[in-house]
Amino acid sequence: MTDATTPSETVDGALWTIADVERDTGIGKDTLRVWERRYGFPRPRRDGHGDRLYDAAQLARLRLIRRLMDAGLRPGRIVGLPPAQLEALAQQLSAPAAAPLAAGGADDAVARALAWLREDRVEALRAELRAALRRLGLAPTIDALVAPLAVEVGLAWQRGELLVYQEHLFTETVQGVLREALAAAEPAADARPCVLLTTTPGETHQLGLLMAQCHLAEAGARCVALGPATPLADIVEAARRTAVDVVGLSYSAWSAPRDVLEAVQRLRAALPPAVALWVGGAGAQRPLRRVRLPGVTLLARAADVGAAVRRWRAAQAPGGASGSSAP
């Protein structure tokens, strides 16, 4: 994600130059000009020198288009769509990452947490998360609060309701609270399975990894957490040296499907057959449902981690079907 742009101030409000928009969205100036002619969007106004100026609504729409493109959608399909349809597409891509909200005020908790973030009340957000952990426990807090809140934060950013720094505040706050909880739930040193958690190059989102780690801890599994964007060769070497049973990967909704499929195929081919490969996150669902890969277990959401641990243990038991294939 790029840093927020600094708009030009005009009597009509904040406006962004084409260079500002290019820096913010990563969409090139030439591409923006082509889209104007081909799709009728964006529609910048002009200053006294004839230079293009974009308002906040167009910038937010271009941010959303960029993220949908990163998820594998073609410009010809999405650039001309109205904002409501673009947001609906984004929700479809993001929805698998979140579990259904639990009863008992979870919707209210998500709304409160989002309000704290909008108001920069980080301590209140932290208190909301800690209260949920005390009330619900680690894994239920992930499913009922953290996962749906992460989706809402992403959509709010796309709509221009949150700034880049606020999204970063959310991520850092949630990660800090979850790591506190993980420290108190550390499994035994010889617990199995032992799962190496990371993402492949190009995928920098860490929150999905941390949510998976919380579910693994609650299931009594041990983790080797490498953080994001580990080269494939290093993942294979780390798996060998640490003697893990499973490699777990996470992909955000904005991962390019072709990149996901290629990385998972290459990694599965390089790992020993005895090492299972579990892949989760919203970005993994489309490519790995379309192309079923032997020896790869696709997890639809973080809550599926516990079931995957139970299946792995059952397969290792006497008479079990030991191996890394998906069920």
Image (spheres, helix red, strand yellow):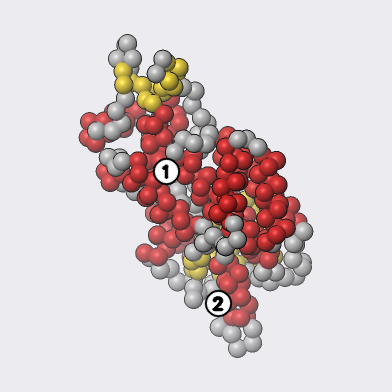
Viewed as shown, does residue 215 lie left or right of 100?
right
Query: Pointer 2: residues within 10 angstroms few (<14), some, or many (20+)?
Result: some
Kind of residue at badge 2: Gly
Q: Position of residue 220 (x, y in %)?
A: 70, 69
Query: Pointer 1: residues within 10 angstroms few (<14), some, or many (20+)?
Result: some
Kind of residue at badge 1: Arg
Residue at the top extreme, as displayed = 48
Determine which residue is flagged by label 2. Answer: 323
| Residue 67: image tag | 1
Q: Nearer the viewer, residue 285 or 126?
A: 126
Asked whether disc 1 touches disc 2, contact meaning CB atoms under 8 Å apart, the reply is no
- Residue at coordinates 60% horizontally, 35% vertically from top-left? 119
Residue at the bottom extreme, as displayed = 319
Q: Nearer the viewer, residue 47 or 195?
A: 47
Q: Nearer the viewer, residue 121 or 3?
A: 121
| Residue 209: image tag | none
The quarter of the displayed image where residue 35 is located: top left
Q: Nearer the viewer, residue 263 or 119?
A: 119
Disc 1 secondary structure class = helix
